[in-house]
Image: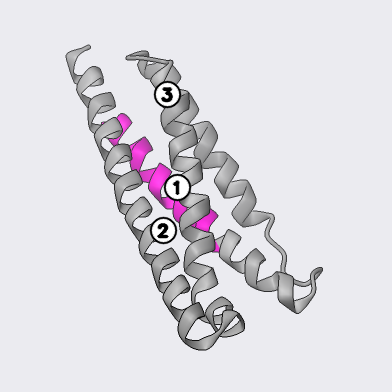
Amino acid sequence: MERVIENIEDMKHELSSSIRVWNHKKENAADCFQRYTEETGYANAIAWYSKDVIQAEIICEKLVEFQETIAGIGDNADAVLGHTEMFRNKFLEEVLGASFDHCEESHRLVARQEYSAYKTLYEIFTGFTKILSR
């Protein structure tokens, strides 16, 4: 039982670490976007930095959502693992269901960044699952 609690704590620590990293990336991308907008105009900034802002925003939002979900679970290993796998599978469905052919070119940029964000989230949650399954 002690090992299970330790795994949950390790996963929560990794989650908090991931949130800090992605919040930093999001803030940095937003700062770069703002500076580039001031220097070269909005259209150029969109072309260069929107992908970073979109990806970081989605990843941060989903990580915080997961953190809030597991905060109420406590040390119930089965419930934490179940929710972790549920989130991971939801992100895998987003990746597998991605299609870029159906939308206009302007929307493809966002769709590709959403795809990249969900792929990254799937990888993050696969890591969480491995921590919990040790």
Q: Callout 1, which amino acid?
A: Cys
Q: Which residues are magenta?
A: 116-134
Q: Nearer the viewer, residue 28 or 94?
A: 28
Picture residue at 46% right of the left edge, 57% below the top: 56
Q: Nearer the viewer, residue 76 or 44?
A: 44
Mark 3 vs mark 2, foreground winner is 2
Q: Is residue 132 magenta?
A: yes
Picture residue at 59% right of the left edge, 61% below the top: 115
Q: Kindly report the secondary structure that dominates the magenta region of the rendered protein.
A: helix
Q: Callout 3, which amino acid?
A: Ile
Residue 36 is at least partly visible in this image: yes
Label 3 and label 2: CA atoms lie apart by 23 Å
Q: Whole-percent x and y of residue 58?
A: 53, 51
Which quarter shows the N terminus? Answer: top left
Picture residue at 59% right of the left edge, 41% below the top: 90
Which residue corresponds to mark 1?
60
Picture residue at 46% right of the left edge, 80% below the top: 36
Q: Which mark is residue 70?
A: 3
Residue 84 vs residue 41: left or right?
Answer: left
The mark that comes first in sequence, 3 or 1, is: 1
Instruction: Mark 2: give few (<14), some (14-19) or many (20+) Cα within 10 Å.
Output: many
Which element is circle 3 on?
helix
Instruction: Mark 3: give few (<14), some (14-19) or many (20+) Cα within 10 Å.
Output: some
Q: Residue furthest front?
A: 38
The mark that comes first in sequence, 1 or 2, is: 2
Mark 3 vs mark 1, foreground winner is 1
Label 3 and label 1: CA atoms lie apart by 16 Å
Colour scheme employed for the rendering of this structure:
one colour
Which residue corresponds to mark 2?
26
Which element is circle 1 on?
helix
